[in-house]
């Protein structure tokens, strides 16, 4: 496992997704292929439409069905959205196994771990699917100890 190829942006401050997106654009301009999978933020068509203009160099995926953030959904909607989240996780695994990109960004993935929507075992499976050449980036509010084991670069974002 090449720790230098795993980056984490976490904390309560704003700008984690923006930092990851900036890195994606910069890397794509230098010839890297990037896939971004966004979790828990809802299906925001305007943002998705704009980000899809970056294709084919940067491919953006959201498996959300609802437009609202996960925390704003009813219990029934959260159950349905949880299945969509699992589909996004399985897609991330497939991307790593098949080597579809040189950089995989999992936006708001840390919340999945924090809320036990994805287990630590799932994270280990994901990390073991990663080739030495693939870079991974995670964003979210809190970083658990298991991810620290894999991360080479960790940035804590504070404030607004």
Image: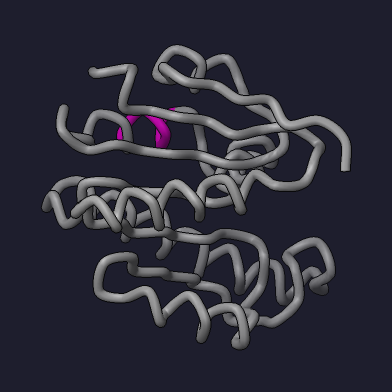
In the depicted view, which residue is nearer to us: 90 or 20?
20
Task: Measuring from the top left, give residue 64's x and y in whole percent.
Answer: 57, 74
Extreme residue in the left direction: 98
Coloration of the structure image = one colour
Task: Measuring from the top left, give residue 10's x and y in whole percent.
Answer: 66, 33
The residue stretch that appears in magenta: 121-125
Quadrant of the rendered structure where residue 131 is? Answer: top left
Quadrant of the rendered structure where residue 54 is? Answer: bottom left
Residue at 29 percent of width and 56 percent of height: 28
Chief secondary structure of the magenta portion: helix
- In the picture provided, is 15 more to the left or to the right than 49? right
Residue at 33 percent of width and 19 percent of height: 4
In the depicted view, which residue is nearer to us: 113 or 150?
150
Is 45 drawn above or below residue 106 in the view shown?
A: below
Membership of 123 in magenta stretch:
yes
Number of disc labels: 0
Is 98 drawn above or below residue 71 in the view shown?
A: above
Quadrant where the image shows the C terminus: top right
């Amino acid at each position: 496992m090449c720790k230098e190829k795993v980056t984490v942006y976490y904390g309560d401050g704003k700008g984690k997704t923006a930092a990851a997106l900036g890195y994606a654009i910069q890397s794509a301009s230098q010839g890297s292929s990037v896939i971004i999978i966004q979790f828990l933020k809802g299906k925001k068509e305007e943002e998705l439409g704009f980000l899809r203009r970056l294709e084919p160099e940067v491919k953006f995926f959201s498996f959300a069905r609802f437009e609202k953030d996960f925390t704003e959904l009813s219990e029934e909607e959260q159950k349905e959205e949880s299945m969509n989240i699992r589909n996004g996780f399985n897609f991330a695994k497939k991307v790593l196994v098949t080597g579809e990109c040189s950089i995989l960004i999992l936006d708001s993935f840390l919340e999945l771990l924090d809320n036990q929507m994805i287990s630590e075992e799932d994270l280990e499976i994901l990390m073991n699917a990663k080739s030495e050449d693939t870079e991974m980036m995670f964003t979210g509010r809190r970083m658990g100890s298991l991810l620290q084991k894999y991360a080479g670069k960790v940035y804590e974002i504070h404030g607004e």
